[in-house]
Image (cartoon, coloured by chain):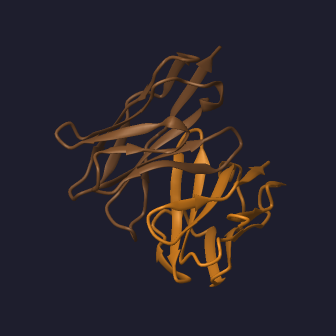
Amino acid sequence: DAGVIQSPRHEVTEMGQEVTLRCKPISGHNSLFWYRQTMMRGLELLIYFNNNVPIDDSGMPEDRFSAKMPNASFSTLKIQPSEPRDSAVYFCASSLSWEQYFGPGTRLTVT
Amino acid sequence: AQSVTQLDSHVSVSEGTPVLLRCNYSSSYSPSLFWYVQHPNKGLQLLLKYTSAATLVKGINGFEAEFKKSETSFHLTKPSAHMSDAAEYFCVVTTSETDKLIFGTGTRLQVFP
């Protein structure tokens, strides 16, 4: 099993640009989670899906952030427009029950 | 509401000595508790979990944790630290399989030769 796959691993972009982060969960898992990790705020849950349906998006910082899960094997997190304060590592995780399996993360730098 | 408090932001030990990473939890319901480890530039990996079975839980890499309801604690221990244990450790609480995980702020473990 390849585990949770995230792309790109690193993204550097200029303020105002659109950024799309991608996640492929482990096959058979029915829940998917997007997290953001920064030094200041630690690990924050942004949104999670169950059976492709968004269950809780209360952690999404503002309208510039959006997430979709069009099918069981793919999800995107989009930031439009991006700002320097969005610089962080974004993790995707998937689960079938208790244990969440994390991807390697996408390190986003917005200049 | 649930929460976890990791009492130490940094812990330093010498290789071969015991490790203790402290975690206290707050939960209105019977919690499930986890410890995750994050090595530099890596994702998080589950070390162990407590889900209301045995109160002493054994995990990977020789780590274990004991659930103490009276103390609302779930401290992580290892008898002998190894250099490869140097990482960030997160204590996590949830109350159901479908509920979101609540992460602590993390404890950075340094291991000196």
Instruction: Give the answer, above or below, for where A100 lies relative to A49.
Output: above
Q: Left or right: where does residue A111 sit relative to residue B90? A: right
User: Which residue is farthest bottom?
Assistant: A71
- The spot of residue A27 in percent (x, y) is 65, 76
Q: Colour of chain B?
A: brown
- The spot of residue A51 in percent (x, y) is 52, 83
Instruction: Say which of B66 and B105 sits in front.
Output: B66
The C terminus of chain B, quarter of image? top right
x 80%, y 61%: residue? A8
Q: Left or right: where does residue A40 sit relative to residue A84? A: left
- The spot of residue A69 in percent (x, y) is 63, 80
- The spot of residue A5 in percent (x, y) is 73, 65
Q: Colour of chain A?
A: orange
x 21%, y 59%: residue? B29
Instruction: Say which of B30 and A87 sits in front.
Output: B30
x 63%, y 83%: residue? A72
Q: Hey, which quadrant is residue A63 in on the image?
A: bottom right
Instruction: Say which of A92 and B37 sits in front.
Output: B37
Instruction: Give the answer, above or below, for where A96 lies relative to A39.
Output: below
Q: Hey, which quadrant is residue B1 in on the image?
A: bottom left
